[in-house]
């Protein structure tokens, strides 16, 4: 199984500017049962990995929040993922499904 925190070497897609698109993945499950079983995370991780592979994007990190509600954006792994984008480490945030990120857009 792929480590839940960091995945590297998935391939690269380079913009005309020469900058590589780095994807920061984010997964979340809302219940402790899902977190303990790992089934929710596994499906989300695989969906993100498959999409990065399909698009030849470099998945540089995969952050996970376990047993946390989507009611707030104050989630440790989400904050870390967004910080990766702010610092330029990554350029794209990818989730398996929009409801893993927020309740409403």
Image: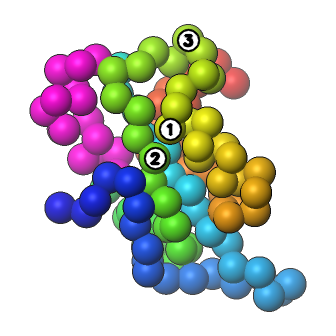
Image location of residue 27, percent across then percent down = 42, 40
Badge 2 vs badge 3, beta-carbon distance below 8 Å: no
Q: Is residue 62 above or below residue 43?
A: below
- What kind of element bears circle 1? helix
Circles 2 and 1, Cβ within 8 Å, touching? The answer is: yes
In the picture, which quadrant includes the N terminus? Answer: bottom left
Q: Between tags 3 and 1, which lies in front? A: 1
Q: Is residue 104 visible?
A: yes
- In space, the residues marked 2 and 3 are separated at their CA atoms by 18 Å
In this picture, residue 41 sits left or right of residue 85: left
> Where does the image place residue 53, in percent across and percent down from the top left?
43, 73
Residue drawn at (75%, 62%) of the image: 88
Q: In the orientation shown, which residue stands out farthest toward the right? A: 17
Looking at the image, is 100 positioned above or below residue 103? below
Which of pointers 3 and 1 lies earlier in the amino acid sequence?
A: 3
Majority SS type along the magenta span: helix
- Decide: is 3 above or below 10: above
Whether residue 93 is in magenta: the answer is: no
Q: Is residue 51 shown left or right of residue 94?
A: left
Residue interval drawn in magenta:
31-45
Mark 1, other Cα within 10 Å: few <14 / some 14–19 / many ≥20: some
Q: Which residue is mark 1?
A: 77
Is 90 situated left or right of 29 in this image?
Answer: right
Q: Position of residue 99 (x, y in %)?
A: 50, 27
Residue, x 51% and y 18% (percent of image)?
Answer: 70
The residue that disc 3 covers is 71
- Which mark, residue 63? 2
Does label 2 or label 1 sit earlier along the sequence?
Answer: 2
């Amino acid at each position: 199984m792929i480590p839940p925190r960091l995945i590297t070497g998935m391939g690269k897609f380079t913009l005309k500017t020469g900058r590589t698109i780095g994807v920061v993945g984010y997964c979340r499950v809302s219940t402790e049962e899902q977190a303990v079983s790992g089934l929710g995370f596994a499906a989300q991780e695989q969906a993100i990995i498959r999409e990065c592979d399909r698009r030849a994007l470099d998945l540089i990190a995969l952050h996970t929040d376990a047993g946390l509600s989507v009611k707030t954006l104050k989630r440790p792994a989400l904050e870390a993922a967004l910080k990766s984008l702010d610092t330029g480490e990554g350029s794209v945030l990818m989730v398996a499904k929009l409801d893993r990120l927020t309740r409403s857009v």
